[in-house]
Amino acid sequence: MPKFFTPNEDGINDTWEVNGITDQSYTIYIYDRYGKFLKNLSSNIGWDGNFNGKPLPSSDYWFQIIFENGTNKTGHFSLKR
């Protein structure tokens, strides 16, 4: 999982996305540091750091990945503006 991303439209690390999981489908849930749900992502889709069309501030964000077999993985990453 990427530890950070920088959505500044320079073409490098502009979205946070999980790569390398190819054997099953999954859903990712992203939360802010207070536990507020922000976004869910399907397999192979990235997040641009926006919520309701507005850019979120630089901060740490948490994720949960739930795989189709019921297992899950949690962690966090940083959004740097």
Image: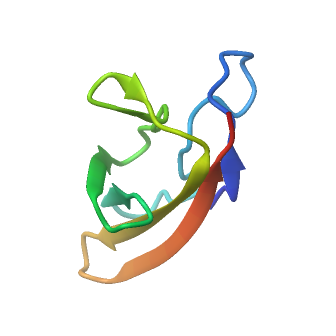
| Residue drawn at 59 percent across, 52 percent down | 59
68 is higher (above) or lower (below) than 57: below
Task: Give the color scheme: rainbow, by chain, secondary structure or one colour.
Answer: rainbow
Q: Quadrant of residue 9?
A: top right
Residue 61 screen position, x and y as percent: 50, 59
75 relative position to 27: left or right: right
Relative placement, left or right, of 50 versus 67 is: right
For the residue pair 62 and 55, the one nearer the viewer reads as: 55
Quadrant where the image shows the N terminus: bottom right
Q: Residue at x 69, y 41 (%)?
A: 80
Picture residue at 69% right of the left edge, 59% below the top: 3
Image location of residue 14, percent across then percent down: 63, 29
Task: Where is residue 53? Give x, y as percent.
Answer: 32, 22
In the image: residue 56, left or right of residue 64: right
Instruction: State whether residue 28 is above or below residue 44.
Output: below
Horizontal side of 10 relative to 58 (left or right) equals right
In this view, the residue in front, 58 or 28, is 58
Q: Position of residue 15 (x, y in %)?
A: 57, 34
Q: How many marks?
A: 0
